[in-house]
Image (tube, rainbow, N blue to C red):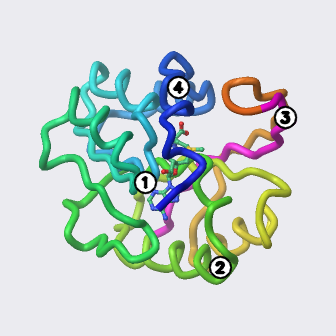
Amino acid sequence: MITPYSDGIFYAVKNHVNPFILETVSKIAPGRVIDLGCGAGNNLRHMIDLGWDVYAVDREKIAIDMLNEFLPSDHVFCCDLRCMDFSKLPNWNLILCNYVLQHFTRVEMTEFIERINMTSRANCMMILSVFENRSDFSVDEVFLELKNLNWQLKNSEKWSRMDTSHGDPHQHEGVDSFWIKSS
Ligand SMILES: C[S@@+](CC[C@H](N)C(=O)[O-])C[C@H]1O[C@@H](n2cnc3c(N)ncnc32)[C@H](O)[C@@H]1O
């Protein structure tokens, strides 16, 4: 399947780590993290150094090849998040899901969040980043899904920037957010 990532250009930019993730992770004790739609794993390398047990999922073979360079093969999953059986993964403390939902329809987004919720234990944390204006649903609708499932929003930051990392320069707007599942 041809996707916006198949040519590997997006994954060639390896030095960008999401500052919201850096800041949030610096305040929590290491445990097990699973990055859903991890790309080349830019947000994961420093977490290994911090002592996190890192698992990663992406559907793009080029990204998976890059992850296999620094993660054990049984920590890396090449599959589609819309149909992945999350119960096959070990229990996690933290989910990363950053700038992935723009590839989902509203129905897929809702089902995905429900499946994450069903397989997450109480006090599980999530750092979720969502683009504005890139889907048939809004950031507020994503947040409402989580709140209805008893996830508490602990922190969020809106941002806007010109992206020159791939294709013609284009404006990106999004929200980074940190959540904890209530008991
Ligand atoms: C914009 S990139 C974000 C990568 C990484 N999370 C980050 O913040 O740098 C989106 C990633 O989501 C992955 N992705 C999109 N839809 C997916 C799906 N249905 N299943 C698995 N991965 C998917 C893409 O292959 C791509 O690597």
Q: Is mark 1 within 8 Å of ligand 1?
A: yes
Q: Is mark 4 within 8 Å of ligand 1?
A: no
Classify residue 85 as left or right of residue 155: left
**127 lies above or below 40:** below
Q: Which residues are magenta?
A: 168-183
Q: Secondary structure at mark 3?
A: strand
Of mark 2 and mark 3, the one earlier in the sequence is 2
Q: Which residue is mark 1?
A: 36
Q: Which residue is mark 4?
A: 22
Q: Residue at x 79, y 57 (%)?
A: 134
How far is disc 3 from disc 1 in space, using C-alphas?
A: 25 Å
Q: Residues within 10 Å of mark 1 (few under 14, many from 20)?
A: many
Q: Secondary structure at mark 2?
A: helix
Horizontal and vertical percent for residue 11? Answer: 49, 31
Horizontal and vertical percent for residue 128? Answer: 59, 51
Of mark 4 and mark 3, the one earlier in the sequence is 4
Of mark 2 and mark 1, the one earlier in the sequence is 1
Disc 2 and disc 4 in contact, CB within 8 angstroms: no
Q: Which residue is mark 3?
A: 170
Q: Residue at x 35, y 24 (%)?
A: 45
In-front residue for pair 148/60:
60
**109 lies above or below 74:** below
**104 lies above or below 74:** below
In-front residue for pair 61/70:
61
Please say whether residue 169 is one of the residues in the magenta stretch.
Answer: yes
Q: Which residue is mark 2?
A: 148
Three-letter code for the amino acid on which mark 3 is drawn: His
Given this view, does label 2 or label 1 mark the residue nearer the observer? 1
Please say whether residue 7 is one of the residues in the magenta stretch.
Answer: no
